[in-house]
Amino acid sequence: MFLLQSGDNREKKPVRVGPWGGQGGFGWDDGVYSGVKQLVIAHGSGIDSLQIEYDKKGASIWSERHGGSGGNKTDKIMFDYPQEILTHITGTYGPLMYMGPNIIKSLTFYTNKGKHGPFGDEQGPSFTSKIDEGRIVGFHGREGFFLDGLGVHVLEGIVKVSYGVLKEPVPQGPGPWGGDGGRPWDDGVFSGVKQIFVTRTADAICSIQIEYDRSGQSVWSVKHGGTVGTATHRLKLEHPHEFLVSISGYHGSTNREDKHKFVKSLSFQTSRGKYGPFGEEVGTFFTSPTADGKVVGFHGRSGAYLDAIGVHMQYWLGSNNRPSRPSIFKRSGWAD
């Protein structure tokens, strides 16, 4: 596990940063806690509301829902607290209509293990709360029918990851491989992969959606890509006994006239065997690292198709940390 080093807390006081966004609505301040355990975000063209589960010396405390009751979609981010620490946020703000008031348009959350988001519409001026070697211990802002403004309380220089005594694998993010179209996405880092859905056309991979495991809880990603797929494949791993080791595939354009590149095929290598290829193996070949480790997250680019894909890896630090690989190669079925 990560060793969290703490300095002299008596000499450290949280710093109030922000808020960024608009001046409408009413001001609110949740105050200061030990850390952040979970976030619930409702969003559409902007951020409709934000609700936070804090940790206060081992006790869970939920904030009120800050903002309105709208939102086309609600996402839940569950951090692997206290090993996963919320370090900073970024986002954008602007009006929903011409000459309208500014609200928070999008939010992205960063931890010592990865990135969550963006959520909302990444339009307008951007902001960041990043402070070196700090962690977020509270939120404040302004609220009305939307989340008008958002700021944070940051504890500086208290939590550091001591890499010299790191016991668990280190997340890394190779890739993405493919084209540069679409919009970037990053699911972040989880404990493992439980299930994958892939849709495709005859020419390219249309979308991918992943069911992750986070400390025993299932977390589904959004569908990355479009809805034009004519075939659907499902890979169900026998988690935790079977884990994803690497991915490979091909990327290229769908025809000679089109210069845009997409992911054209995907194969998945697990601790029990290989699944695929799924799609057309034409174009430029790519593969994620095949060193001893496992895939614990995906990132990439997507629009109408899956433009590019990459992985977050965790590598075993010594043979004692490697999970055993079963000798029986029992393959989970794909449904076409």
Image (spheres, rainbow, N blue to C red):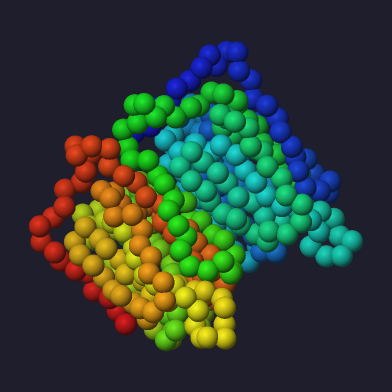
Against 141, is 260 above or below? below
How many numbered circles are shown?
Answer: 0
Query: Which of 328/137 is in front?
Result: 328
- Measuring from the top left, give residue 234's x and y in whole percent: 33, 73
Task: Tell me where residue 210 appears, x and y as whole percent.
Answer: 40, 63
Q: Is residue 129 left or right of residue 95?
A: left
Compared across the picture, whether 318 is left or right of 16 comes to left
Q: Residue at x 19, y 37 (%)?
A: 320
Is any part of residue 193 visible from this angle? no
In percent of width and height, residue 21 lies at 77, 47
Residue at the location (63% across, 37% down)? 130
Residue 4 lies, with reference to residue 170, above or below; the image says above
Inspect this view and state whether residue 259 appears.
yes
Kindly give the residue lying farthest to the left in the view shown.
Answer: 327
Q: Quadrant of the C terminus?
A: bottom left
Image coordinates for residue 257, horizontal then vertical, percent? 57, 86
